[in-house]
Image: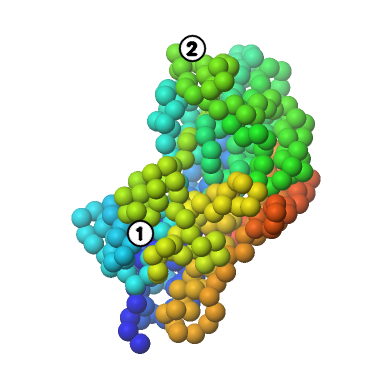
Amino acid sequence: MTSKTVIVLGGGVGGLSVANDLRRRLNRQHKVVLVDKTGDHVFWPSLLWLQVGLRKPDKITKGLEKLLKKGVELVRGEVDSIDPVAKRVGVGGKTYDADYLVVSLGAQLAPDRIPGLSDAGHNLYSLEGSVAVRNFCLGLDGEAKGTKLVVLVSGMPFKCPAAPYEAAMLMAHYAQNNHPGTGTSVSLYSPEGGPMGVAGPVVSAGVKGMLAQRGVDYYPTHQVEKVDPGTRTLIFEDGSEATYDFLAYVPPHVVPEVVCEAGLAEVGGWIMVDRESMETRYPGVFAIGDNTSIPLEMGLPLPKAGVFAHGQAQAVAKTIAARINGKGEDGVFDGHGQCFVEVGGGRAGFGRGNFYASPVAQVKLHEPSRRWHIAKVLFEKKWMKQWF
Ligand SMILES: Cc1cc2nc3c(=O)[nH]c(=O)nc-3n(C[C@H](O)[C@H](O)[C@H](O)COP(=O)(O)OP(=O)(O)OC[C@H]3O[C@@H](n4cnc5c(N)ncnc54)[C@H](O)[C@@H]3O)c2cc1C
């Protein structure tokens, strides 16, 4: 059998799991090459704990070079071109040829799409922004009377539908318990009609109830148009305004430029794939995770979430291994997923279900309890151990 090469683009949730799974399924005559621009893997769900001082950046980050000992080759650099027909990628002036390509470059965060946003606040979805949020929360004291903390979702779609809601609840819980009597308020503005709408009206109402119980003021259907950092004012598309003392925002998400330039996605769109095989319109080129979009019957796309990137990675690894090995069945991504909803105080809710169900997703939300919080802590430990 001739030696085959699989190149995986991106060392995030999807890329890390597909590379590991392929290495396990293919014998060593075949090459698995992982390309990433940072060389580090961050466990993003723990960013929410970091924001309230419960984690440190080095505890939720691991170097991808640890994969070398497993036989995964690593290229550290920015993917600057992809030719999906030739299955050739360019990284920092060098080209690499593949027999199979897996594109898992995530969503690019684009705060500059909203005038004033990046100067006005801190990016809730970055390590640096989360450290700034943590420093602010930890520094709240009796002097900071009436501080108005605002969490802003600045555009759709955004990854992890629960994350901004969890961030707001964790901050509210932290302020109420560690700095009582300071009058700190937490508000959340979002363009969505309701939280986690893709999971159905019952789940959405459940999360809304959790916000209310924790004293988070929630303003849905608010699409921000611009921000005035001078007067600390959010200006929304409907003409309404809101002020803040401290702003933590979820930036607009766009598909990485290199993906558009490759013709894998339209400008302003995402990579379209077969929703079960995750193969693109180019045979042998697969795309998984946040850089894809999968339309659902209910009108919204499948959420961008690590749980789906992971499930898709497993399906793609199985398919590629079956094709290379000439035996075994293709993998199928079936749209099932679950997520924790951290609410503060060592408690979390838990949602689980089938997002491919017809005509709407079938998702059940479990009430917040200590059990689900512990399950997330265990999941974090397992994730950081199993792939490295
Ligand atoms: C605060 C927060 C909390 C979250 N909580 C959860 C949760 O509880 N559950 C859940 O399921 N999901 C959660 N998510 C979402 C989850 O992290 C993402 O959906 C997941 O990481 C997507 O995986 P991916 O492989 O598609 O992209 P990513 O994990 O973003 O990986 C993309 C990789 O590509 C690399 N890259 C990008 N462009 C280039 C380039 N040109 N060249 C080389 N490398 C490049 C990046 O460095 C990165 O390593 C959360 C996200 C955040 C921000």
Q: Give how far across and how far down residue 329 sits, in percent.
A: 54, 79
**Whole-percent x and y of residue 184?**
65, 20
Mark 1: secondary structure = strand
Q: Would you place residue 291 above or below residue 330 in this image? A: above
Circle 1: is it few (<14), some (14-19), or many (20+) Cα within 10 Å? Answer: many
- State which tag comes first along the sequence, 2 or 1: 1
Q: Residue furthest bottom?
A: 1
Instruction: Determine whether 25 is above or below 203 in the image.
Output: below
Is disc 1's CB within 8 Å of ligand 1? yes
The Cα atoms of the two marked residues, 2 and 1, are separated by 43 Å
Q: Which three-letter amino acid code belongs to the residue tagged 1?
A: Val
Is 232 or 330 nearer to us in this picture?
A: 330
Left-right relation of 110 to 360: left
Q: Amino acid at mark 2?
A: Thr
- What percent of the width, then of the height, locates residue 247? 53, 25
Q: Quadrant of residue 282?
A: bottom left
Q: Which residue is mark 1?
A: 35
- Which sits in the foreground, 165 or 298? 298
Residue at the spot of label 2: 231
Residue 300 visible (yes or no): yes
Instruction: Give the structural element (helix, strand or loop) at label 2.
Output: loop
- Residue 132 picture location, percent across and down: 49, 30
Q: Is residue 358 left or right of residue 45?
A: right
Query: Could you tell me which residue is drawn at 49 percent across and 73 percent down?
Result: 319
Q: Quadrant of residue 215?
A: top right
